[in-house]
Image (tube, rainbow, N blue to C red):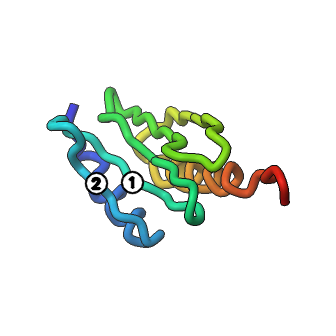
């Protein structure tokens, strides 16, 4: 499937949140952005190509201070893409706010 149905929403959403939306990774068409959480953590929000009016949004860890691994997925109709992206960003904020050892 094509990303045409989600690009306008995704790129506008990313711009509103000060995130750089990316289109290509490893020669394959993908849609994702990175979310920095301080100097030692980063996360990723990715979107799979929509199928039959449904889109999958994923929030992942990329690098964490304690090597914790995180993933959460949303499966939503195209009309709810922005809400799912907001949910992914909120989930990342929760992961980033977790207690750190030695604080």
* Residue linked to disc 1: 33
Q: Tell me residue 79's x, y (percent).
A: 43, 47
Q: Tell me residue 86's x, y (percent).
A: 55, 56
- The residue at the point 84 percent across, 60 percent down is 103
- The residue at the point 59 percent across, 47 percent down is 64
* Residue linked to disc 2: 22
Question: Could you tell me if the residues under marks 1 and 2 are in contact, i.e. CB atoms within 8 Å?
Answer: yes
Q: Secondary structure at mark 2?
A: strand
| Label whose residue precedes the other's in the sequence (1 or 2) | 2
Which is more toward the observer, 36 or 4?
A: 36
Q: In what quadrant of the picture does the N terminus appear?
A: top left
Q: Residue furthest top?
A: 52
Q: Tell me residue 38's x, y (percent).
A: 59, 65
Which is more toward the observer, 5 or 24?
A: 24
- The residue at the point 15 percent across, 37 percent down is 27
User: Would you call the spot at circle 2 few (<14 residues within 10 Å), some (14-19), or many (20 or more)?
Assistant: some
- The residue at the point 23 percent across, 50 percent down is 23
User: Would you call the spot at circle 1 few (<14 residues within 10 Å), some (14-19), or many (20 or more)?
Assistant: some
Q: How many marks?
A: 2
Residue 11's disc number: none
Horizontal side of 99 relative to 87 (left or right) equals right
């Amino acid at each position: 499937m094509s990303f045409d149905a989600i690009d306008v929403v995704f790129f506008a959403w990313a711009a509103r949140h000060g995130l750089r939306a990316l289109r290509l990774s490893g020669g394959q068409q993908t849609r994702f952005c990175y979310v920095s959480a301080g100097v030692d953590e980063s996360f990723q929000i990715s979107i799979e190509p929509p199928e039959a009016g449904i889109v999958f949004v994923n929030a992942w860890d990329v690098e964490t201070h304690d090597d914790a691994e995180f993933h959460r997925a949303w499966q939503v109709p195209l009309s709810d893409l922005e809400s799912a992206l907001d949910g992914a960003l909120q989930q990342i904020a929760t992961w980033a706010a977790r207690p750190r050892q030695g604080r």
